[in-house]
Amino acid sequence: MSVVDRSAEALPLHKQIKADLVRRITTGEWWPGELMPSETALAAEYGVSVGTTRKAIDALVQDNLVVRQRGRGTTVNSTRQRYKPYHFDRFANAKGERAAETTLYRSCEAAKASAAEAAYFGLSRGAPVVKIRRVRVAGKTPVVVEDILLRGDRCPNIASLLLDAKPTSVYALIERTFHILIIRVEDKVRAVAADEDIAATLEIAPGEAILEVDRLAFDPAGDVIEHRILSVRNSIHYTNDFT
Amino acid sequence: MSVVDRSAEALPLHKQIKADLVRRITTGEWWPGELMPSETALAAEYGVSVGTTRKAIDALVQDNLVVRQRGRGTTVNSTRQRYKPYHFDRFANAKGERAAETTLYRSCEAAKASAAEAAYFGLSRGAPVVKIRRVRVAGKTPVVVEDILLRGDRCPNIASLLLDAKPTSVYALIERTFHILIIRVEDKVRAVAADEDIAATLEIAPGEAILEVDRLAFDPAGDVIEHRILSVRNSIHYTNDFT
DNA sequence: AAGTGGTCTAGACCACAGC
DNA sequence: CTGTGGTCTAGACCACTTT
């Protein structure tokens, strides 16, 4: 039951309600794009005042999980919408134009994790994982090589789904199919000299300077769902605003 | 006067009040660390209800301009506190330890802007600027070269102040001395081959891959106060979390 | 016309810091 | 003890979208 805990030690009501709404979104009670119940309806359901549900929903808006539209209602955000302000993979050329128009799947297969690979997920060697290599192409120029490692136990059978759909956004597929929301990402960016393999794929000279982005993607529980290494042609910028 | 506009076309009261509080903070009415008036006092002053001032202050908290402490009051944040969660210059080695323990000033002088330099600030050629080169050193290893271009008209005489104090944080000096708050930063990161000059300063081989970070720093009005190029040794990561 | 979110008010009670 | 911010309530009016 979604009744609220009013004991003295409990969390504030608006935090309890926010957590419950996140749970209900991630379990697929409302699909991305679908209207959630109104503030007054939720207030009645949880037995609190409208101001309290408003505060809970404000927090969801803050986290980009949800969008409000006056006169219409509140809708769950899709992964793509959620990350739009950042272009999710934050790559643009010197003129600020988006790069990466097409995405080519070079390989995609289920595997057993090495000890190092399993460590990203806090699992043990041999845990099921899925390994993907994709190339992002702008016009005719390959600009980014993506080596993706997905947590197989949370995404059963995803390899064949990816090979079927070959989607641009892995996160959107995971969200639709497994109700896993990626809500946080950690990037580590550094400059490296391209090795033979990457240089051939990017069609540049071995040893040329490229960006290497090491990314971890987290679900709302803080579990790592994906580890991804991006190798980026040096004509492309990684952009970042912060306040 | 800080009276509020209640006409139909006006912005919501909480937004007007937020804007006015930003103005009062940036004009130095309250120093970083100092207590602002309480929510009830501000409500009385602006002639609105407490809920409205709370909403305005919530927005300041959101922007990291201000910190609330229950039972004590609300204090203005210093630049250093404001950017703490990001380590402001986001550099750490592979173990996640901070790099850049010492900062060496190599040069610092007032100059007239070239057309390209002035363009960063939306000014014309010949506008007063200040050029600074600093080197960040971790242990005995130079890890970052900073080439900084400051807007001279907004920071009069800053060259001699910098040479006196040689501060680690230029932003903190600007904040204290000129009441300019840096509230937003835009970074563009790419990989380049080190040129002779940078290679010599970083004590690496010319042509080695380094990170180049191109940064613009903005005040609350959206004016560019600084343009900065960071050249970063490739043992150092640029880290970034986002949601 | 009905329902939604956006704004604003006025009050209550609580946890906490400082004197 | 006083004053602070943190939570919660209950209601009003408005702008807007949908039916």
Image (cartoon, coloured by chain):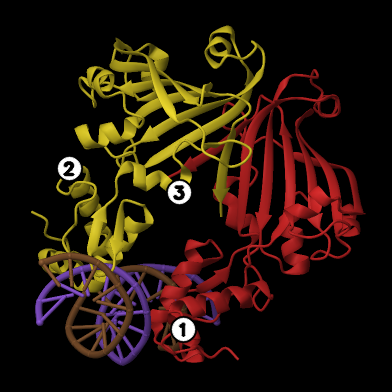
Chain colours: A yellow, B red, C purple, D brown
Q: Nearer the viewer, residue B174 or B36?
A: B174
* Cα distance in 3D space between marks 1 and 2: 42 Å
Residue drawn at x 54%, y 13% is: A198
Residue A27 disc label: 2
Tell me the kind of residue under disc 2: Thr
Tell me the kind of residue under disc 3: Pro
Residue B97 position, x and y percent, is 60, 33
Q: Nearer the viewer, residue A168 or B53?
A: A168
Compared to A36, does A102 lie above or below? above
Q: Is residue A232 visible?
A: yes
Compared to D2, does A185 lie above or below? above
Q: Is residue B169 visible?
A: no
Q: Which residue is mark 3?
A: A85
Residue A169 position, x and y percent, is 35, 32
Compared to D18, does A140 lie above or below? above
Depth check, mark 1 against mark 2: the one in front is 1
Total of numbered circles in the picture? 3
Task: Using a 10 Å C-alpha cutoff, classify the residue at mark 3 as few (fewer than 14 neighbours), some (14 to 19) or many (20 or more).
Answer: few
Asked where in the image residue A119 lies, by quadrant, the reply is top left
Residue B229 disc label: none
User: What secondary structure is found at the residue carrying circle 1?
Assistant: loop
Q: Which residue is mark 1?
A: B10
Residue drawn at x 62%, y 41% is: A95
